[in-house]
Amino acid sequence: MSTGTVQSAPFDAIINQVGDGYLQIGFTNDSGGALVEGQEVIIKSNGKLDKRDADGEFPIGIVYKGGANGARVGVKVRAGAQLNVVIKGGAATPGQFVRNNGNVDATTGLAEVVASPVNAYSGFIVIEGAAQDGVAKVLFLPATRGGAGSFLVQTLAAYTADNEGTPYSSVPGALGDAATLVDVNALRAAVENLRVSYEDLRTKLIATGVVTA
């Protein structure tokens, strides 16, 4: 089958659509230009669509009915269901990956979800956000690794580079013999290697979204 709405209570308040792997859902185009059939799209933090144009972006599906910027476009999303969940652990915005925490909300009877850490398996992606303890709308995904945008992104401590690339030509006072100078320069080289390695790792981590500076 294609898509449909589950009618039997109480599930009609929880699962909005189910399908055989792809649902057809309308979103607002916020890409700054037209979106055309066959184009991969991502969901932005405002709940609207943009075109996918980078490796690290997770496409929710492809456009099957295009439209100009600001228009509603039809998207075949790569999801088995669209459903309501209760957000725990912080507010959720569209585009964030979340997973069940194993609990059911006592007030609504809906499953609770929390943010998926980067590279953890995620069950859902948020398409309509909510504050903590609020009801959000999510898409049920095939097994997917979480990405940037989780609540658990950490901030690196402040860092100031100190280049140790220039060898010392002398050492002061009683330490000023040739053997000590060799040792000091060996230590300097080791410190410089650590600095270069750390800055390379720092740059790559920031690029993945695991951390922020």
Image (cartoon, rainbow, N blue to C red):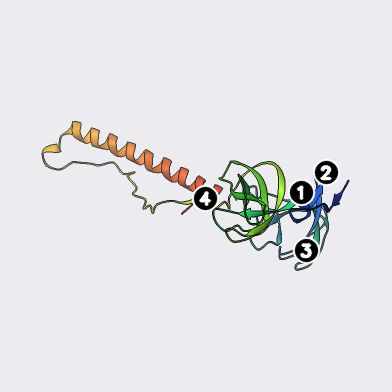
Is tag 1's residue or tag 2's residue first in the polypeptide sequence?
A: 2
Q: Are marks 3 and 2 in contact (CB under 8 Å)?
A: no
Q: Position of residue 75 (x, y in %)?
A: 79, 55
Read off the residue under disc 3. 34
- Kind of residue sitting beneath label 3: Ala
Is tag 2's residue or tag 4's residue first in the polypeptide sequence?
A: 2
Taking 106 as reference, is 181 above or below it? Answer: above
Compare residues 183 and 143 and report the one nearer the observer.
143
Q: Between marks 4 and 3, how big is the CA–CA gap?
A: 34 Å
Looking at the rendered structure, the secondary structure element under dot 1 is strand
Q: Are marks 1 and 3 in contact (CB under 8 Å)?
A: no
Q: Between marks 3 and 2, how big is the CA–CA gap?
A: 28 Å
Q: Residues within 10 Å of mark 4 (few under 14, many from 20)?
A: some
- Kind of residue sitting beneath label 4: Leu
Read off the residue under disc 1. 81
Q: Residue furthest top?
A: 179
Looking at the rendered structure, the secondary structure element under dot 4 is loop
Read off the residue under disc 2. 20
Q: Is residue 123 left or right of residue 1?
A: left
Looking at the rendered structure, the secondary structure element under dot 3 is loop
Read off the residue under disc 4. 152
Looking at the rendered structure, the secondary structure element under dot 2 is loop
Q: Residue furthest left?
A: 174
User: Residue at the location (62% across, 58% down)?
Assistant: 93
Is tag 1's residue or tag 3's residue first in the polypeptide sequence?
A: 3
Q: Position of residue 18 (x, y in %)?
A: 80, 48
User: Residue at the location (79% across, 56% down)?
Assistant: 25
Is tag 3's residue or tag 2's residue first in the polypeptide sequence?
A: 2
Q: Position of residue 62 (x, y in %)?
A: 78, 52
